């Protein structure tokens, strides 16, 4: 199954906090994704090992360290298809996302 997705990834990076009053009351900035740490979220049931990205959206950083990244991507995932009632069948396919390196929360 090929799917266009815009996963919304949010996290807090305490090293990215600042006091807006020290910087002309700037509360939000946008930076290229290659300039900051990004979570290593992958599609575990990826069918071909690749994903296509049409463009790399900026990461939105709030002064309290909140990070927001919504990278558009096209994934190919694998799932079991049941065609018993074809052509009136309905399919449900779960996309399983997770961190590639994080084992568990500490």
Image (cartoon, helix red, strand yellow):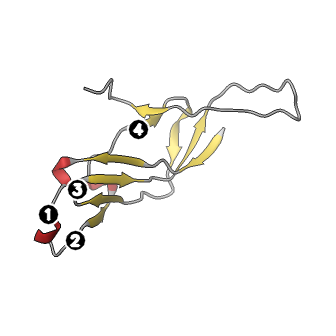
45 or 14: nearer the viewer: 14
Instruction: Tell me the tag on residue 56.
Output: none
Q: Are marks 3 and 1 in contact (CB under 8 Å)?
A: no
Q: SS for tag 2?
A: loop
Q: Residue at x 19, y 48 (%)?
A: 14
Mark 3 closeness class: few <14, some 14–19, many ≥20 residues within 10 Å: some
Disc 4 crowd rating (10 Å Cα; few below 14, some 14-19, many 20+) is: some
Cα distance between the residues tagged 3 and 4: 23 Å
Q: What element does badge 1 sit on?
A: loop
- Of the two numbered discs 4 and 1 in the rendering, the one whose residue sits closer to the viewer: 1
Q: Is residue 33 left or right of residue 53?
A: left
Q: CA distance from mark 2 to mark 1?
A: 9 Å
First of labels 3, 1 by sequence position: 1
Q: Earlier in the sequence, mark 2 or mark 4?
A: 2
Depicted 43 relative to depicted 31: above or below: above
Q: Mark 2 near mark 4, Cβ–Cβ under 8 Å?
A: no
Please give the residue where the numbered disc 4 appears in the rendered image.
Answer: 41
SS for dot 4: strand
Task: Give coordinates of residue 50: x percent, y percent.
Answer: 51, 39
Which mark is first along the chain, 1 or 2? 1
Dividing the image into 4 quarters, which one contains the N terminus? top right
The CA distance from mark 3 to mark 2 is: 11 Å
Left or right for 77, reference 50: right
For the residue labelled by badge 3, is the local secondary structure a helix, a strand or a loop?
loop
Furthest-bottom residue in view?
A: 24
**Disc 4 versus disc 1: distance between alpha carbons?**
30 Å
Report the residue marked by disc 1.
19
Disc nearer the start of the sequence (3/4): 4
Picture residue at 10% right of the left edge, 69% below the top? 22
Query: Can you identify the residue that label 2 sits on?
Result: 26
Q: Residue at x 19, y 73 (%)?
A: 25
Using the image as rendered, state which of residue 42 and residue 16 is in the foreground. 16
């Amino acid at each position: 199954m090929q799917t266009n997705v815009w996963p919304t990834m949010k996290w807090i990076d305490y090293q990215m906090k600042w006091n807006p009053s020290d910087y002309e009351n700037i509360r939000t900035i946008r930076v290229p994704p290659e300039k900051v740490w990004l979570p290593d979220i992958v599609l575990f049931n990826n069918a071909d090992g690749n994903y296509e990205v049409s463009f790399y959206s900026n990461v939105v950083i709030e002064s309290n360290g909140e990070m927001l990244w919504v990278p558009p991507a096209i994934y190919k995932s694998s799932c079991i298809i049941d065609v018993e009632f074809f052509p009136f069948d309905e399919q449900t396919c779960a996309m399983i996302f997770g961190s590639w390196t994080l084992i568990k929360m500490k």
